[in-house]
Amino acid sequence: MNQIYRWLGTTRQNMHQRLNRALKGAEEKEQLKVILFQVREDHPQMGCKALYRKVNPQTMGRDKFFEFYRSYGFRIAPKKSFKRTTDSTGVIRFPNLVTGRELTGVNQVWVSDITYYEMNGKFYYLTFIMDQYSRRIIGYSASYTLSTENTTVAALKMALGRLAGDGPVRPIIHSDGGGQYYSKEFLNLTSGCLRNSMCKNVYENPHAERINGIIKNNYLKGYHPTNFSDLRIKLKKAVYMYNYEKSHSAINHCTPIEFENQLSKELVTLQ
């Protein structure tokens, strides 16, 4: 192998560094597709230059971003019935294990998504993981960039604390086809303790899409964060208020925490 590296004019270390950069770039591109479709729905007339400044991609320069942007037809004004689907915005790596599944308790299905939050003319990225049965947000993160480490990995590390001492429980983690959900770092965390599931279009992940809107529009919009540090503080408050104060008709008009406490009491009674 060393002879091959010498023939290529490089070293093993340099080759691995180049491969890692390429993988990071591919992951960001896949999630950028998802974000671009979200932004286009919310800001149909936003130009490419303005979007580049707001998104601030880490692995591509302005010209590459413009080429990437145009490759999805964003120069043409979208129709009113424009629909964002993972088929055109992501790569499906795992089958959908959730559709048609009847849930009977917590830690059976976790749903997750990444969304953007616009503040002071820039985009920041919010990642949520929610227990579908109890509606409780069990993991979240805020990030400057779409890096896996600061989005899905950060949120998942928080959520995994929920499984401590639960024995052989292996929840399904359901998401779209964004690159952060099949990155090496993310899959290393899910290996052995979670089952990966991905949707083919936005309609197969409605709970995650809904939580994005609730936190952004019902909480953060009213909290008016002023900078990234403040956003993280306000996000923590929003998640707390959602989990402890917001009732849901789907869980007997309880808050997620109240509902989980009821389930725990019922389990103790049955034992």
Image: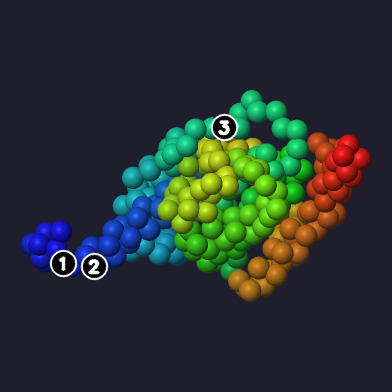
Viewport quadrant of the N terminus:
bottom left
Q: Residue furthest right?
A: 269
Q: Residues within 10 Å of mark 1 (few under 14, many from 20)?
A: few
Looking at the image, which is closer to me, 5 or 205?
A: 5
Position of residue 93 in the picture relative to residue 243 (left or right): left
**240 over 204 or under it: above or below:** below
Callout 1 amino acid? Thr
Name the spot of residue 215 as percent of width and height, x first: 70, 54
* Alpha carbon separation for disc pair 1 and 3: 43 Å
Q: Check disc 1 and report its element: helix, strand or loop.
A: loop
Residue ID at (70%, 53%): 165
Question: Does residue 65 appear in the picture of this structure?
Answer: no
Looking at the image, which is closer to me, 54 or 215?
A: 215
Q: Check disc 2 and report its element: helix, strand or loop.
A: helix
**48 over 248 or under it: above or below:** below
Residue ID at (64%, 43%): 168
For the image, the number of numbered tags is 3
Q: Residues within 10 Å of mark 3 (few under 14, many from 20)?
A: some
* Alpha carbon separation for disc pair 2 and 1: 6 Å
Viewport quadrant of the C terminus:
top right
**162 over 10 or under it: above or below:** above
* Alpha carbon separation for disc pair 2 and 3: 39 Å
The quarter holding residue 21 reads: bottom left
Q: Check disc 3 and report its element: helix, strand or loop.
A: loop
From the image, tell me which residue sits under label 2.
Answer: 14
**Label 2–label 1 contact, CB within 8 A:** yes
Image mark for residue 97: 3
Position of residue 4 in the picture relative to residue 104 (left or right): left
**Label located before the other in sequence (2 or 3):** 2
Residue ID at (69%, 43%): 107
Name the spot of residue 30 as percent of width and height, x first: 42, 48
Q: Residues within 10 Å of mark 2 (few under 14, many from 20)?
A: few
